[in-house]
Image (tube, coloured by chain):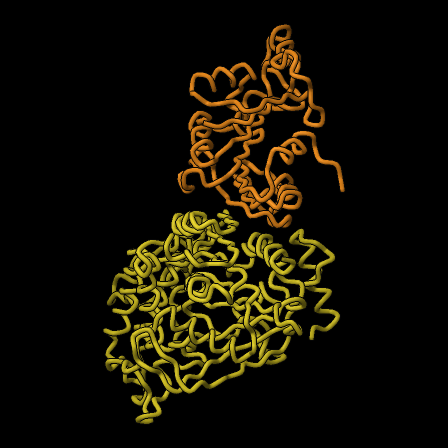
Amino acid sequence: METLRKDHQIIALLINKGSKVLDLGCGDGTLLKKLSELKKASIQGVEIDPEKIKECSKAGVPVIHADIDEGLSDYPDKSYDFIICSQTLQAVHKPKKVLDEILRVGKKGIVIFPNFGYWRIRKILFFGGMMPKSNELPYDWYDSPNIHHLTIKDFKNFCKKEGIFIEREYCFKSLDQEKSSFLPNILCRFGMFVISR
Amino acid sequence: MLLPHQVFLCKGLKDINGMEENTKKQSVGLVEPETITFDSIELECGRKLSPVEICYETYGKLNSRKDNAVLVEHALSGDAHAAGLYSADDKKPGWWDIFIGPGKAIDTDRYFVICSNIIGGCKGSTGPGSVNKKNNKPYGTTFPPITVRDMVNAQKKLIDHLGIKNLLSVIGGSLGGMQVLRWAVDYPEAVKSAVVIAATAKLSAQGIAFNAVGREAITSDPNWFKGDYYDKGKNPEKGLAIARMIGHITYLSEDVIEQKFGRKTKADKDTVNGDCSTRVDFTQDEYEIESYLSYQGDSFVKRFDANSYLYISKAMDAFDLYRDYGSLENAFKNVKSGFLIVSYTSDWLFPTWQSKEIVKALKANNISVTYYNIKSESGHDSFLVEKEIGELEEVVSPFLDNIRGR
């Protein structure tokens, strides 16, 4: 079996066998397919990009062509065990609404986002005086799909304020490499949180 | 059979379109319609229709496990002739020939494809133009009203006759999509997967409105004779042509009409009423869109029966899964099929929101769904248009493949 990306490995460990999983911004469906194979999960993807829809179809991953910003109003309360939102939150128009909906429809949410507080990003902004570009955030300010940049600290503060319970927290130096959580907001490129309400 | 040079031609065209070179798309070749007669069928209205003939075609081979059958549903003006040719010099292949055949989206090298003419139709299956055995006269409007459920029940008899218990997939667009929904709701055990294209679980008021105008055109034609025109030596051609013209406008998008025809005139001049010194002739087509619609209307009357148009359009109007089950969510309660729902951004007759409601109701029942809202410019008819078919193929082909593997 090919090796799974580290964040996918962790998600596969977090998810119980036979869980119902919804992946918001599921891309080509790689993660969902793995979860279906490894965990016999009942899977459903949501994706806005037509090319990814076609890739999901090839992978046999059921996917709904939709804009997450338009909400999950089609889905009943607590109808999924897990809702994954991987590197999507920073690109939606209303992240608060999306997170509220994740926690309404899902029993648990798994959120992964690029950490804008990562030291290299701070460095570019501080010394370069420009909006940072990196492997994780490769876009120029004017054509970036990422419209709500956040840091790990921002996310934690948000959860506290909104009464969202952080069950687990992971940080990654890259998505292939998990880091100990020492100074995560400075040393991690990505944050991953398991949340519930 | 395709001759080698024809295969070469196909391949050349594919290269231009940028499609994969190694997939050889071919025609199913020469086909023949078949007809099966059933003693009777109980209709939704309570009447019994007897006997009932169903005209159908099949392509590909049914495997020994009989689990590779795909039922294709046709739309209002379609028929059992979905693919292939009737003779070597036949210029017009079946209505979905771009989608069905060896190497095509519904690959006849893998699947056994069945398509039958709906009851109420006029292409070989029993309809208002058929002879009523009780008085040896064509039914006309004494033919009982039919519904989408009746169409599906007749197909179920055909499937049973062919010895098929489970359909790998039922696929259709427009009215065909309505039949697919009916199949999945009424025969959950028999339908492994359902592909619903440019369809709705209930026809909109706008859809009913257009159908109503089409019917009015037919019934107000003096040659309609309350439906008893079969022995009169004339039939409501004009009315049917107008109905088709109206229908055709609703199948196209504003964009595509603008692009294709714009304000182009036939004589390439933009005169208003012709020669102003004589009587004005309003019957002449002036703009290209006019002559296009006239052509569509005229060619339709040669192949379609006006009474069938009335009956089938009524069946479309009446289709309403919301009403039948209290809610769409409730309608899908016992459904077991996996679903692929496709809508087109330029379809204003069966708009995207109607497909989204189907998706929502399926999700509420925890049914596996793939939904693709295809960006298109050809309107409701996109699923039949060659330049739009690639996008549909890219989801339907792997969908069937994955269902087969399951």
Q: Is residue A76 above or below residue B396?
A: above
- Towards the viewer: B65 or A50: B65
Does residue B251 appear to the left or right of A175 in the view shown?
left
Expressed as whole percent of the image width and height from the top left, the position of residue B254 reads: 40, 51
Residue found at x 53% / y 18%: A150
Residue found at x 51% / y 38%: A81
Q: Locate residue B68: give its quadrant.
A: bottom right
Asked whether residue B258 is in view, the answer is no
- Towards the viewer: A136 or B296: A136
Chain B, which colour?
A: yellow
The N terminus of chain B lies in which quarter of the figure? Answer: bottom right
Q: Locate residue A163: give its quadrant.
A: top left
Does residue B319 appear to the left or right of B384 in the view shown?
left
The C terminus of chain B lies in which quarter of the figure? Answer: bottom right
Expressed as whole percent of the image width and height from the top left, the position of residue A143 reads: 55, 25
Expressed as whole percent of the image width and height from the top left, the position of residue B310 reads: 31, 72
Expressed as whole percent of the image width and height from the top left, the position of residue A105 reads: 44, 36
Q: Is residue A130 above or below residue A171?
A: above
- Towards the viewer: A99 or B111: A99
Asked whether residue B281 is in view, the answer is yes
Residue found at x 57% / y 64%: B168
Residue found at x 42% / y 66%: B186
Does residue B129 appear to the left or right of A20 in the view shown?
left
Provide the letter of the chain coloured orange. Answer: A
